[in-house]
Image (spheres, rainbow, N blue to C red):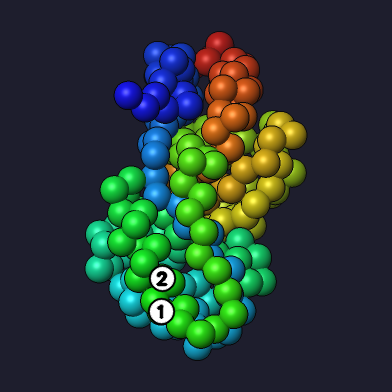
Amino acid sequence: MTVSPLAAWTDRLAALAPVLDAAEVPFRTQLTVRVSDRDAVAAMGTALGVVFPSAACTFTSGHGRFGDVEVLWLGPDEFLVTASPDLQVPIEEVLRGALGDARGSVVDTSAQRTTVVLQGPRVREVLAHGCSVDLHPASSPVGTCVQTLLARTGIVLQVTGTGVTVLVRSSFAEYFAAWLADACTEYLAVA
């Protein structure tokens, strides 16, 4: 039986309410796509049924050929495709087929990170305690995604319409959860 990186933290994360709701969404499909050929990027989006982002540090999402899929632009030639846990193989095959002869790669990085969804009135304030990215809505509107450090831990941060999604390395997930609980302390005292 596979155990998620934050399985032991479910109750402690639930105790952060009402400051924020924190929920792990483990075992998501995560495929790192490296390609700079714009035609190949467009072909991959068509094959997936979700257009790849056209601007750096943004993500797109949609209900494509494989259900709910997100595509994050992480670097000049680097994208991260995320989806339900059971879709890794079919999505990987479709992306590789769409890549064709273009120079690039599609690599399964699903086991590398776990996903933590944060919602609530203080999400941006809590994260600001350990993140150098300006999380004010004017600077980080919905649709923003960045690779950054949070409390000296590498993360991928997505600003969604309902909160923030954090992808954190599985080996640092418990550290991240402990930091999150500590960062909420001052807000819990007045909640």
Determine contact: label 1, label 2, CB under 8 Å: yes
Where is residue 71 drawn, in percent x and y? 45, 63
Q: Position of residue 109 (x, y in %)?
A: 51, 50
**In this view of the protein, which residue sits in the foreground, 1 or 72?**
1
Percent position (x, y) of residue 158? 52, 51
- Is any part of residue 8 visible from this angle? yes
Check disc 2 and report the residue beneath it.
Answer: 95
Residue 74, relative to residue 14: is it above or below?
below
Give the residue drawn at x 41%, y 83%: 43
Please identify the quarter of the rendering in which residue 45 is found. bottom left
Check disc 1 and give the amino acid type.
Ala
Where disc 1 sits, the SS reads helix
- Tell me: 70 left or right of 58: left
Q: Name the residue under label 1.
A: 98
Residue at (36% x, 54% y) in the render: 88
Q: Which amino acid does label 2 sit on?
A: Leu
| 134 sits to left or right of 84 | right
Does residue 75 sit above or below 126 in this rendering?
A: below
Residue 119 seen: no
